[in-house]
Amino acid sequence: YQRITFKSDYQIHSLRWGNYYFTLQAGKVTGNAPYHLLFNPAGTYKPINKITVYSMDGFETMRLNEILYDEFYSLHFRYRFSKPIINGKKFRPLLSLTSAMVNGRFNQFTRHSSLNYTTLNKPFTESGLIIDNLIKSGVSGIGIGAFYRWGAWQFNDFRDNFALKISLSLSLG
């Protein structure tokens, strides 16, 4: 088998308009690859009563090992406003908007037919709102983010599509 992956990060910084962050990933497996070398997105979902940490390249509303594929492409986007929501001396929270999507195919059905998995046939999409630096101390900050799963992979119950995360930031310069 052959396995190839590609990842590219791109940032646009603007003091006036804010900061844009893009991450593009793609991968393909050919041949008879074992299960553990196939691709599954980094699903980081936990129920609301178990708040976890925001992961910039993960899918906040996707369950662990929810989707499996042998070729994929994904895009993560984050826009952080340049000015705080409230411009106080010690309280200066920053607002960010985020969106992520992944799509792919799974062609190795017969080789892995005994396993329980879901394959992508339509894009998985989610979006969120993050408020960074609700608590700030020196060079670090703690915030909160809310994320919603929408589109073809959306669940019927609103609560199952919603994830709440803690955001951590570190400013080194």
Image (cartoon, rainbow, N blue to C red):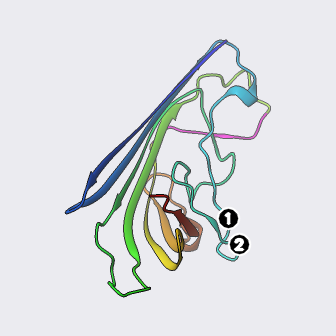
Seen from the viewer's position, the closer of residues 89 and 18 is 89
Count of numbered badges drawn on the protein:
2
Q: Position of residue 173 (x, y in %)?
A: 44, 58
Crowding at mark 1 (Cα within 10 Å: few <14, some 14-19, many 20+):
some
Mark 2 to mark 1 CA distance (whole Å): 6 Å
Q: Residue furthest left?
A: 16
Region rendered in magenta: 115-122
Residue type at mark 2 is Lys
Residue occupying the point 71% across, 21% down:
110
Residue 19 lies left or right of residue 33; in this view the side is: left
Residue occupying the point 31% across, 56% down:
19
Q: What secondary structure is the stretch in magenta mostly built from? A: loop
Tell me the SS state at disc 1: loop
Judge whether 85 appears above or below 139 on screen. below
Which labelled disc corresponds to residue 73? none
Look at the image and say whether residue 108 sits in the magenta stretch: no
Which residue is tagged 1?
46
Residue occupying the point 57% across, 61% down:
54
Judge whether 111 appears above or below 81 on screen. above
Seen from the viewer's position, the closer of residues 15 and 160 is 15
Q: Position of residue 77 (x, y in %)?
A: 38, 51
The quarter of the picture where residue 75 lies is top left
Residue 45 lies left or right of residue 11; in this view the side is: right
Q: Position of residue 154 (x, y in %)?
A: 50, 59
Crowding at mark 2 (Cα within 10 Å: few <14, some 14-19, many 20+):
few
Residue 90 lies left or right of residue 19; in this view the side is: right
Judge whether 26 appears above or below 134 on screen. above
